[in-house]
Amino acid sequence: MPGLAHPTPPGADPRPAALRVLLALAVVFIMLATTGWTAVHRPEAGTPLRAAALAAWAAARIDGRPVPAADAPAAAVARFFGALDGAQRARLADGYPLVVGNLDGAPAATRYRANRRGLEQAVRVEEARSHDVALTPADRAVAVRRAHRFESLAAPGRQILTFDPTGGGRVAEVFGDLDEARRVSVIVPGVDTDALTFERTQRRFTAPVGMAESLYEAQGAAAPGSRTAVIAWAGYTAPTGVGMDAATGHMAFDGAVRLKSLTAALPGVSSVALFCHSYGSVVCGVAAHELPGRVTDVVVAGSPGMRTQNVAGLRTSARVWATRDEGDWIADVPHLEVGGLGHGADPVSPEFGARLLSSATAKNHTGYFAPGTDSVDNFAKIGTGAFGSVVCATGDDVCRDGISGAERH
């Protein structure tokens, strides 16, 4: 059964092992009961803007040519947009923003333009909802918050790669020049991530935007003049709270499909590193075996597991790194998978086989991307390819073994 680390030796009493499993399951259920059982699906909020946009796109044409399906492979989308001139791309972005802005394979600049238009549409809708007396006061308050968030995302200069206001909302933002980057880093966040929590004023570096800004700045310090880009990717529906959704993998499987599409569709031939936090590491674990070869590194921080027993089980050619702060409460979550509950072995255990990174100055479960921490400095070195100066958790250089260019110190 997945999650049991060792078979019971012949002649040994199987009861202690069984008791350990039962105890671990009891801990899981106690945690779920005390934190609240979340619904299987996040309640729908917002408006059906995206659904209406998809219906219009299905009948769209550009100068007599049919457009690709909204779920067409990225390569087909890239060929289609590659045959258009700038004016045609702009017309599609302005006419169908909530589709074009989410088309993997469309040029980044076209998606930025489309998503700015889509955000402007969404602001108007949320402002109208905030005054709708047919809604509850709580719903009107959420509409006000969403309108403010969408206004912020639509600000000049922001590069929004994905925007879908459906439900809690999906968003991705690029820092740096995605077209010119030689190395791209993607931050894959965990629970309680949606459009409203995509960025925060308080506890800034616990939200995807703050994480990405911190990592991008650290990369500039680690390798001045390097051509890098960082994507804050909240492009999947994450679980709400530490409940049933977070304890199972069904949301991770949907997220893995979207992550695979994103990484395969990035422009150019840049290498890609994934930085997967908390439940985001479950998404990365599920996606690992189908990620394109350009994904050279998968880094997990504060991971509850990657739905496998070891690195070999991920079936990836990418280097796999793991880190966890001493005060991170995720260490107390049972690292097993039984009957669909739990996410498998602990990625920082020696048996898992990941390259273990230092996060000595990070604080707790949400502090891995705070500026000046060992963890974000290590992430920046991996993201820029400066493997020779990565600091290993074990105090030696074992985590750098076998990497070309990583000199031993």
Image (spheres, rainbow, N blue to C red):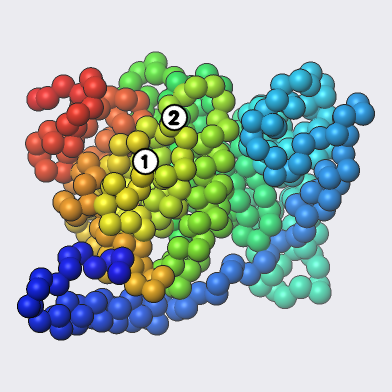
From the viewer's perspective, tell me whether residue 2 is left or right of residue 151: left
Tag shown at residue 316: 1
* Percent x, y of residue 220: 37, 24
Q: Residue furthest left?
A: 11
From the viewer's perspective, tell me whether residue 367 is left or right of residue 73: left
* Percent x, y of residue 209: 49, 43
Task: Specify whether residue 233 is in view.
Answer: no
From the viewer's perspective, tell me whether residue 62 is left or right of residue 30: right
Mark earlier in primary sequence (1, 2):
2
Name the residue located 54 percent from the left edge and 49 percent from the top edge: 257
324 w.r.t. 229: above or below: below
17 w.r.t. 205: above or below: below
Callout 2 crowding tier (Cα within 10 Å): few <14, some 14–19, many ≥20: some
Q: Report the amino acid beneath label 1.
A: Thr
Tag shown at residue 328: none
Tag shown at residue 294: 2
Q: Quadrant of the N terminus?
A: bottom left
Q: Report the amino acid beneath label 2.
A: Arg
Name the residue located 46 percent from the left edge and 40 percent from the top edge: 291
Marks 1 and 2 in Cβ contact (< 8 Å): no
How many marks on residues? 2
Q: Residue furthest front?
A: 10
| Local SS, label 2 | loop
